[in-house]
Image (cartoon, rainbow, N blue to C red):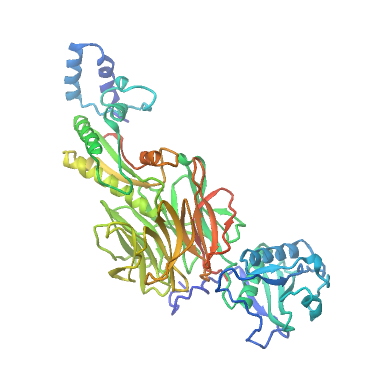
Amino acid sequence: MFAQQVLRPLTRIFPVGGAVKILAVLLLGLAVAGCAGGDKYDVNASGGANAKPGSAQDFAVNVGDRVFFETDSTDLTARAKSTLDLQAQWLARYPNYNFVIEGHADERGTREYNIALGARRASAARAYLIARGINAGRMSTISYGKERPVAVCNDISCWSQNRRAVTTLKGASG
Amino acid sequence: MRHLNRATSHWFSMLRNATLLLAIVLAGFVSTSASAQLQLDITRGNIQALPIAIPSFVGSTGQVDQLSQNVTRVIINDLERSALFRAIDPATYIDQNANPDAMPRFPDWRVLNAQALAVGRIVQEADGRIRAEFRLWDVFGGKQIAGQRFFTQPDNWRRVAHIIADAIYERLTGEKGYFDTRVVFVDETGPKDNRTKRLAIMDQDGASVQYLTSGGDLVLTPRFSPSRQEITYMSYATGKPQVFLLNIDTGQREVVGNFPGMTFAPRFSPDGQRVVMSLQQDGNANIYTMDLRSKRTTRLTNSPSIDTSPSFSPDGSRIVFESDRGGSQQLYVMGGNGGEATRISFGEGSYSTPVWSPRGDLIAFTKRSQGQFLIGVMRTDGSGERTLTSGFHNEGPTWAPNGRVLMFFREPQGGNSGPQLWSIDLTGYNERQVTTPNFASDPAWSPLLN
């Protein structure tokens, strides 16, 4: 499904040493490493150092695939903006990825409003990435409202993990 | 199509289900008096329940059988759950063999302080149908005040019971009943972070649960058509969240309209011919209608805000909706075709999910205030706000077709818990859980079926 065969050798030689690393970076630029791979990644299972550059795991662990919002807010915080800056750099480096931005809300709201709130959060992240030069044609948005919490909880610190916009890589285009 | 040129959209008499046959007033016993002395005023809160005697209906042989007993049980359950009636313990009956065809011995019932007496029979006909008959007596007035006969298929025995309960309720309260109705809702199973949601439908008393979708797709906010066996709801079935129509009888599904974005928060217009909903575009949601025949869409709001949860007034002339155009979520009323909107909610907190009462005089809502989620009602100009129930999380009121009872869902605080359905009287009394097989949310009450 993805152009894995191009990237596989690169990621193997990547950690070896200085000279090879330069080669790797060059090759990355040439071969366009649009590979999420077929590999399922698990953010918690391995550290960022082990992530293959240009992989979905690399994106999730070393860049950060999600930004968080204040209660009832769709404004991007300073921290959210810096995460999106990193996302924009990464997405610019690996331009073959298309992606979906999923907007979510916490459970302390009503269902229909939260669907719209999630959409507005996804839209805020999308607009920021476009402003950072990412082609709008690569991205789509979807809102799940309060229907897809990552954290099951009932206190303020926990709800904050659910108020999020998650950039989910779809794989290489073309 | 047969409902198209109905002049007025009357909430109370819309569905004529072909499976139920004609109700015939029992001749010879019918009361000539329209001005019953026996009348229950249900507009006040916490009234004393009216004592009523309902001896088990008899079967074909004149004796109580399983079917007649079941029908009687459902009638009593309907009436008692309304909290307006108290069924007198049959063990105290002096007349243990009340003949449904004979004039009751009223002194036997007066001594029990039974204000009303309902008797009846359920008979198997030769053609396979069942015949149901009942009479309602005013015990102290000493006369029959209602009497009906129905023919139907045996499978419909629960509906027969609900129709009889409605007749008793209507005769004694002067208000239409709400027992012969159904509720569509979202059945929820599995852990909170990976929940399966299915559309389900049941009788208003929680019986006869059937599933309408398989659980493969996320489905939300089902609502009944006022005129057909149809619901509109939001589904992620196509990958793009959209408003759908589902025919309950045939299972046929279709997307409502071809909109350039996510559509959600659907409801039918009172004549059932249009769906009003929100369309999300970038960060904003605006309200649109789509005519189900012509497929024509009309934009009703145009604001850089989240406008959602639209609900028509029963005459179709106005729409209440929620909007954060002023900063926080508040309720607004505009014309049925859009136009200028007037804010009606001014209390402390934010307001959402407004639903216009079928009687037209009130709007029910969810309100968030001081960390609590409550269900309340206000008049359509925003005055007279009143809280019905409050707690950690209450959401999404829906009206019984007579406008006297509301159902909503309640979610407790704590880890992997889930929502349950509850009902409460408009008076704020008689709050009780509606039993469902699993967790349940987003209830929507049907119109009266009969």
Percent from the top left, x then y, of residue B189?
52, 44
* Horizontal side of residue B41 vs B223, given as left or right: right
- Name the quadrant containing residue B271: bottom left
Residue in the image at 26% along x and 37% along y? A98
* Horizontal side of residue B333 vs B150, given as left or right: left
* Horizontal side of residue A19 vs B200, given as left or right: left
Decide which of B353, B99 is in the foreground and name it: B353
Percent from the top left, x then y, of residue B314?
43, 72
Residue in the image at 45% along x and 56% along y? B395
If the image is split into quadrants, where does the C terminus of chain B sit?
bottom right
Percent from the top left, x then y, of residue B196?
49, 44
Residue in the image at 51% along x and 48% along y? B412
Can residue B225 be seen here? Answer: yes
- Name the quadrant containing residue A15: top left
* Horizontal side of residue B163 vs B253, given as left or right: right
Can residue B258 be seen here? Answer: no
If the image is split into quadrants, where does the N terminus of chain B sit?
bottom left
B142 vs B126: above or below: below
Decide which of A80, A24 is in the foreground and name it: A80
